[in-house]
Amino acid sequence: MHAALHTRHRAVLPDWLAVYYQRPIEITHGEGRHVWDAEGNRYLDFFGGILTTMTAHALPEVTKAISEQAGRILHTSTLYLDRPMVDLAERVAALSGIPDARVFFTTSGTEANDTALLLATTYRRSNQILAMRNSYHGRSFSAVGITGNRGWSPTSLSPLQTLYVHGGVRTRGPFAGLSDGEYIKACVADLEDILGQAHGNVAALIAEPVQGVGGFTSPPDGLFAAFREVLDRHGILWITDEVQTGWGRTGDHFWGWQAHDRSGPPDILTFAKGIGNGMSIGGVVASASVMNCLDANSISTFGGSPITMAAGLANLTHLVEHDLQGNARRVGGLLIERLRAACAGLDTVREVRGRGLMIGIELVEPGTGDPYPEGASAVLEAAREGGLLIGKGGGHNSSVLRIAPPLSLTVAEAEEGAEILEAALRATRSGRSVS
């Protein structure tokens, strides 16, 4: 069944549309933290549709909200008043930490980042953008132009001039041997040097607090606060890309930027993925002065759709009322320690890192320390055979296993997933298959 569908897929969809697994699976339904494929196989989901199923599959409150809204009206557009959109915007603005916040809804994180770039370059009257090495911000023409990750940047053409700054990867590169304080000081010096080479104004720095596609890497807490002090001296805006880190996934904070809040909140915040729990929602939050800088009319045909806003409201309410951020902190802390213990002594594992329910396992070639994309692919396959879905990433080498379950994960499910993943890592290392 899957082979026939895969053949049809390849015949009609682009060659560059990535699909996991040598024998791709068709996921037909889900419940809680589990999904099932078309052949009836059940999987524990540790990737959640790329960090998108944030609370749980088939969450009753969300499915009810969608059904009830669908029974009234599916679509109107932003040309008309939309009560669910205003309701959700009020909640997001209050949670954002940005003073006098305005919210614009989009349909994806890519579109959100694209809008943030439009706002920043218009506000600053500059097409120069600072971005982080190893970063990923989406697949639009402008987002690809600021992505510091060769594996996801298919063209060097761009409407923007992008200058790449050190700081996204703590354990590799010229500053890897430094202490956290020395690392921050070196990265700030690099930022100052980059600004000395820029022509006139720079519009903004865009950064993921934890790099998602880049392999769940992050700088020491406080780096972006130190950057902000430099940016403020030059009038440069700070855009925090919270598409993967937002809504409490890191456990310690509701937003990733809050680990770097000494110098205040960002100027612009982008979000997507988890807020819709599978529905297509993205958005931008900015102060009124920045958001209102555009001097032309604009609308969004599908951004802020009544049905997606209803889903987002129900999902956010469930998240807050059930303290899923706290659950991410508690269960995520147990899971990362369990995985570190499981990986101790494995010469294919360089590092287990992360916070909350955003965990990466970086693999290397035994004896060389080189990136090991073949090993990551093999573990991905073996984990699926064992009944666990995970992701992968890690720059252009794709040597990091990405673990990001729904935030309602239980302790028992965390232990089950860790056991499957440990077996996959050990079996792949020894060249055996997982039964």
Image: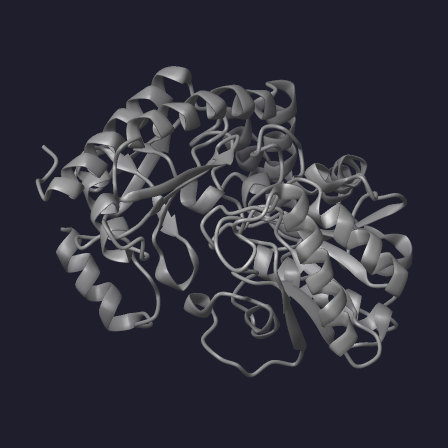
Where is residue 302 shown, x and y percent of the image? 63, 58
Quadrant of residue 409 within the rendered picture:
top left
Q: How many marks?
A: 0
Left or right of 234, for residue 238:
left
Q: Nearer the viewer, residue 431 or 408?
A: 431
Where is residue 285 shown, x and y percent of the image? 76, 50
Q: Quadrant of the C terminus?
A: top left
Left or right of 219, for residue 264:
right
From this view, report whether residue 144 is shown above or below residue 240.
below
Q: Nearer the viewer, residue 135 or 323?
A: 135
From this view, report whether residue 319 is shown above or below residue 131.
above
Q: Nearer the viewer, residue 201 or 269?
A: 201
Q: Is residue 108 visible?
A: no
Q: Is residue 360 visible?
A: yes
Left or right of 127, for residue 290:
right
Q: Residue at image x 77%, y 40%?
A: 261
Q: Residue at image x 46%, y 38%?
A: 353
Q: Residue at image x 53%, y 29%?
A: 64
Where is residue 23 shown, x and y percent of the image? 17, 52
Quadrant of residue 133 within the rendered picture:
bottom right
From this view, report whether residue 94 is shown above or below residue 291.
above
Q: How is the image coloured?
A: one colour
Q: Residue at image x 41%, y 67%?
A: 151
